[in-house]
Amino acid sequence: MNTKNLTQPKQDIVLTGDRTTGKLHLGHYVGSLKSRVRLQHQYETYIMLADVQALTTHFNNPGLLAESVRQVALDYLSVGIDPEHATIFVQSMIPEIAELTCIYSMFVTVSSLRHNPTVKHEAQERGYEDLYYGFLGYPVSQTADITFCKATLVPAGEDQIPHIEQARRIVRRFNELYAPVLVEPQILVGERLEGLDGGSKMSKSLGNAICLDASPEDVRTQIRRAKTDPARIHKTDPGHPEVCTIYGYHCIFRKEDSGNIRERCQQGSIGCAACKAKVTEAIEEVLEPIRERRELYRHRTRDIDDILMTGTARARKAARQTMGEVREAMGIDYFTGPSAD
Ligand code: TRP
């Protein structure tokens, strides 16, 4: 028996990423960016610019991708992802991800993809009827993203839970069909942030998001316009914090004081304007250091490209290694080994 694993603490490998369809917003920050900044100091960390996954919905607008890859990279650096500690890379530049996607897709059923609640929800939201093959299959490609570096921990929002479950099933199936070379990942679920309009998750495409590069004026105006409890017309009307978007923000950005806010809202002893001002201030505390770091990197486009190229080369090394193991496990490594010499 291998006792080494029993005595040594498990070392996680972290992988996560974002579709490159535009700038990131506070929802991304709360859901995943915040924990990545912490995890990068503890574990080997890979952060992926998911430009291929962006193509599943934006294949007719590749220009947007080219622009977004650098925008999202700048967002990463601005929130404090440090290229000395985390490997930031571009998905489309790792051909092994496409190879793994192809191999996994041989034993993933169409019905398991059709039943994936996140895929279903997104298809509905976008009004898709006859689904594109790549869109329906993106959880398979996401499994390739996660497994090429044998990631064990995926910090992501709760909407990604079905994808991680699917990834785990794919890993188990591969390991039982061929040989146990892949590793089952776990999700580290981040907090969910409501959009400014209430009722749905913060999302750029729904126009209800505060971008990470928003100016203080923008933030103030956006919060001022945000939806609150519709039953409150006068400042002294008793409120219902549980239906108020702004109360949700208190719970995330001013957690310690949220009980107090809840009571005062219910009693009608704090008005929405004052309540919003407090949240604005707390959000500013998050955004200000992000703005400062953005200023440091904003004009350093060559440096950003270097960071991405270096990160991609590093990720590629891990991908080649795993791909070799996968080929060997499947016996499709025809021309390697002694007989190939
Ligand atoms: N689907 C993720 C999102 O929309 C982005 C993503 C692509 C991802 N590949 C990934 C997240 C791998 C975690 C792991 O946010």
Image (cartoon, grey):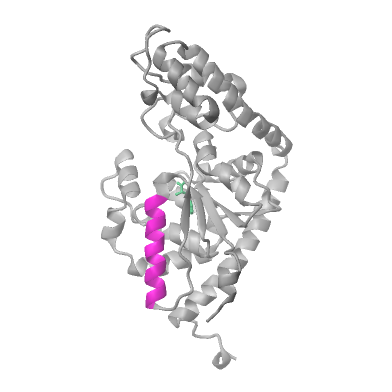
The main secondary structure of the magenta stretch is helix
Q: Tell me residue 157's x, y (percent).
A: 45, 44
* Residue 22 seen in this snapshot: no
Q: How many marks?
A: 0
Quadrant assignment, res 339: bottom right
User: Is any atom of residue 70 visible in this view?
Assistant: yes
Vertical side of 60 occupied by 185: above or below: below
Residue sitting at x 52%, y 38%: 30
Say which quarter of the image contains residue 288. top right
Residue 28: horizontal and vertical position, in percent?
Answer: 51, 39
Residue 173 magenta-highlighted: yes
Q: Nearer the viewer, residue 177 or 323?
A: 177
Point 49% across, 64% down: residue: 147
Q: Which residues are magenta?
A: 161-177
Q: Is residue 129 magenta?
A: no
Above or below: residue 6 compared with residue 214: below
Residue 204 spot, x, y in % from top left: 46, 34
The residue shown at (73%, 37%) is: 296
Question: Which residue reaches farthest bottom?
Answer: 339
Q: Is residue 129 above or below residue 246?
A: below
Position of the C terminus by quadrant: bottom right
Q: Is residue 307 left or right of residue 12?
A: right
The residue located at (28%, 54%) in the rendering is 114
Above or below — where is 110 with respect to 79? below
On screen, residue 274 versus residue 44, left or right, reads left
**Percent position (x, y) of residue 244?**
40, 23
